[in-house]
Amino acid sequence: MDFELSPEVVAYRERVRRIVAAHNTPEAIRVQHETGTFNNPALNRALAAEGLIERAVPGLGAGDPIELWVLFNEIEKAGSPVDALGVAVMIAGVVQHVGNDRQKAELIPAVTSGEALICMGYSEPDVGSDLSALTTRAVRDGDEWVINGAKMWTTMAHEARWVILLARTDPDLPRHKGLTMFLIPMDTPGIRVDPVHTMATERTNATFYDDVRVGDDCVLGEVNGGWRVMSVALSFERGVMGGTNPGVPLLEHTAAWARRSGRLAEPAVREKLARVAIDNHVAALLTQRSAWIAASGGLPGLEGSMTKLFASESYQKASRWFQEMAGAEGLLQLEQPGAAADGWIEYDARHSPVTTIYGGTTEINKNNIAERHLGLPRARR
Amino acid sequence: MELAFSSDQRELLDAFEQFFSKESGPAVVRRAEPLGHDDSLWHRLDAMEVWGSGASTADLAVIAESAGRWIAPVPFVEHAVASPLIDEVGAGIATIALRPATADGAWRLVPAGAVADVVIGVDGADLVAVRSTPPGSGPLNHASAPLADRSARDGVRTVLGPAADMAALLARWKVLTAASLVGVASMALELALAYVQERQQFGVPIGSFQAVQHGLADLPGMIDGARLLAHKAAGAIDRGDDGRCNIALNEIDDPLALASMAFVFAADVAAHATDRSLHFHGGYGFAEEYDIQLYYRRARGWALILGEPTAELLTLADRFWPETVAAQGSGH
């Protein structure tokens, strides 16, 4: 096996690292935690100014999945949020693959310039893991589509320029065959955004679609081909666009605190820190493997599931160990005097639970692995 | 970048899978218990001349994984580590003592110590090789491994270098043992998969129950992660990288650190995989006639022979955070 990055990727990584270090400022972090909007517009624009986002968009040209992984891994390791930019880059890749000329011309430059965000309208109030049961309807009316329904967990909807919306266009077809993906400007009349506040400070949204009228040019891919479009998106995302190394900044924050407080001399503390360092490295290697498979022309869907399972569970384990290790001071939040690891231990204890839920729950990933990798029969549930 | 076995390594793996599956089936493993050594198998393996000076740690790790998959009762890892240091092993077996000799010159619980003709290890300030007659037996143990105490003084004794030279040998032993444990874990998973699809309860294979599936579905990622880490460590040893451990950036190239990491992680994964597999065998997993118990015992025995994992983790922490050494009395 050869784990070496090419000189080009190393150079790319150094540029990303430099820009992230310059823009992931305490002020940027403070604003994120104050507003609940986990995005860093200055960072996005600075990456864009050097062409680094364009390189990472799947299928767009110069970059490859190795760079896509490096970009998001560097942002994540620095403790800067990845999801807002990650969704935008992923959707830009989907548009590049299946979009029409107008969608490409409008959306791709808006993303690669670091200006536009996009939100995902997949889940609904009553539909999550069983996504093909979704009920948001798009009905033909003349040469328009009329969309009615509600979407849940549309994170960044309050900032996004577009929503990528999965809606039912043919209720007579089998469940996942009657769905169509739409790419809709968020300023289209009839869209309402309500905030949903989370335990982890981050704000997400519920979005409501009330007689939203759009033309055929808002269909992304084929009519009734929405499930395939979503598969394309998932194939880009699987495990290489952040989310697999949140334990790295957690470990760094915790080790720095342990050093300052003198706890770093305690064997019990050192043992746990070392264990987390191992898990972090394994998570990185599994992610690198997914990127390598994608760069070799494969689809690392199952490998991505394995990576997400391992990375999210080990992050939760680390978060719990560190909070217990920190004791009462591990309960104190960011900017509170005396907070262990400046409050990051407490923050990660609030943030880590979502990582085994969003982007495919642990149980859905285990179903996939059991049936498609281990070859076990479809489960009795 | 290539994050899978090379085509040469796949051929190597195929060749040894054929060899071990034919020559080291469960009947052979059982027959070799409790000593844990089959001399005839050893001579056939030795005849394949895998120890040549050109063998990279990475290639040896591929073979070690296969030996682990078939829990071959031969000291493959120990001989692969020790034999390159000795000019003339002849037809004999070489091994390493994992801990320094006691004050009275005894190496305790040497892996393959029951059968090795040459033991390499630390005695005082020196790394020495001692050729002496192996006892041919040792204390009954969890893994049915050929462990035995050996003398660092009695026999033909050669000083190989300073005691510090042992670190590189230990690193190689950890990596190859990690690869063997990956093999143990992967075969434990395969045994579980075969059993849960064959065993019927409530009129269906138990492998169709989600509770059973979910108990197995997190294993492949852990096993793949352990293999990746073992091979990253093997590659670092083969290149002779200088030690870099940047925890803040999660960039680790240091061979000694990677070897420790690979060892600790693979030991965890093998313990976990064999535990799950045995459990899903139900009562039969506990029965001697089923193979999973052979794997369960070796997953623990092959790892714990180095000592308690905590000590290894504390040594690792000293490399990661060298500016603060652990408090006194940590026991390492």
Image (tube, rainbow, N blue to C red):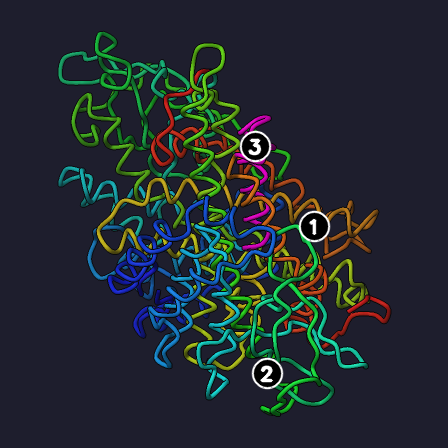
What's the residue at 53%, 69% (across, down)?
Answer: B78
Residue at 14% from the left image edge and 13% from the top image edge = A142
Secondary element at tag 3 = helix
Report, in whole angstroms, how far the alpha carbon at label 2 lies from the one at label 1. Answer: 54 Å
Instruction: In this rendered view, identify the residue nearer to me: A341 or B148.
Output: B148
Q: Residues within 10 Å of mark 2 (few under 14, many from 20)?
A: many
Front residue of B156/B2: it is: B156
- Mark 3 Cα within 10 Å, few/some/many (few <14, many 20+)? many
Q: Using the image, determine if residue A185 lies above or below residue A7.
A: above
Chain designation of label 2? B
Camera-near label (3 vs 2) is: 2
Q: Which mark is residue B131?
A: 2
Relative height, residue A128 to residue A259 (above, below): above
For the record, the magenta segment spans B265-289
Q: Position of residue B187 (x, y in %)?
A: 44, 44
What number is the disc on residue B7?
none
The CA distance from mark 1 to mark 3 is 41 Å
Q: Which residue is mark 3?
A: B285
Residue position marked by numbered label 1 in the rendering: A345
Is residue A307 visible from the viewing direction of this image?
A: no
Q: Amino acid at mark 2?
A: Arg
Asked whether residue B320 is in view, the answer is yes
Of mark 3 and mark 2, the one earlier in the sequence is 2
Dominant secondary structure (helix, strand or loop) of the stretch shown in magenta: helix
